[in-house]
Image (spheres, rainbow, N blue to C red):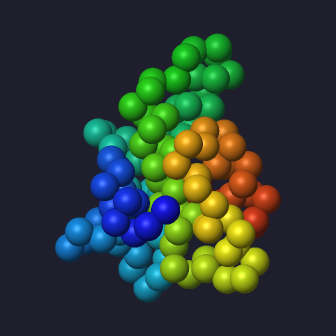
């Protein structure tokens, strides 16, 4: 996924038309908001909904998925170790799969 494709996803922090990575790091999930909730609060809400067998809201799921993609492509995390992950086409991966891949490569997006 290119930086341009990433910048067009809803919920991605951007500046001047490109994903915003201050110092090469992704913004903390506590500093990115969607509606009145931060990304971390959305993630916790999703976990609670799943535990109560409530179907997660599609828009919230998409925002969390997009944030995970934003996190994966942070310049700070680009190395030979993560090159396999970042070179893959992750655009069709589910949120659960993206979280699993992040943790497999030592990244914790939420």
Percent position of residue 44, x then y:
56, 38
Q: Residue at x 31, y 55 (%)?
A: 8
Q: Residue furthest top?
A: 53
Image-based side of 9 in relation to 54, left or right: left
Percent position of residue 97, x then y:
69, 43
Quarter occupied by residue 94? top right
Number of numbered labels in the structure image: 0
Q: Is residue 68 visible?
A: no
Q: Residue at x 67, y 83 (%)?
A: 79
Q: Residue at x 34, y 66 (%)?
A: 4
Q: Is residue 27 above or below residue 104?
A: below
Q: Is residue 85 above or below residue 21?
A: above
Q: Residue furthest left?
A: 16
Q: Residue furthest right?
A: 104
Image-based side of 92 in relation to 57, left or right: right
Quarter occupied by residue 77? bottom right
Q: Residue at x 52, y 56 (%)?
A: 69
| Nearer to us in this view, 89 or 100 | 89
Q: Is residue 99 above or below residue 2?
A: above
Q: Is residue 1 visible?
A: yes
Percent position of residue 66, x then y:
46, 49
| Nearer to us in this view, 58 or 4 | 4
């Amino acid at each position: 996924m290119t930086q341009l494709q990433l910048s067009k996803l809803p919920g991605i922090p951007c500046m001047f038309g490109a994903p915003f990575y201050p110092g090469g790091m992704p913004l903390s999930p506590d500093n990115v908001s969607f509606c009145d909730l931060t990304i971390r609060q959305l993630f916790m809400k999703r976990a609670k909904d799943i535990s109560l067998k409530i179907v997660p809201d599609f828009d919230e799921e998409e925002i969390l998925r997009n944030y995970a993609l934003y996190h994966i492509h942070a310049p700070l995390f680009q190395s030979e170790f993560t090159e396999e992950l970042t070179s893959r086409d992750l655009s069709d991966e589910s949120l659960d799969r993206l979280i699993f891949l992040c943790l497999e490569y030592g990244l914790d997006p939420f």
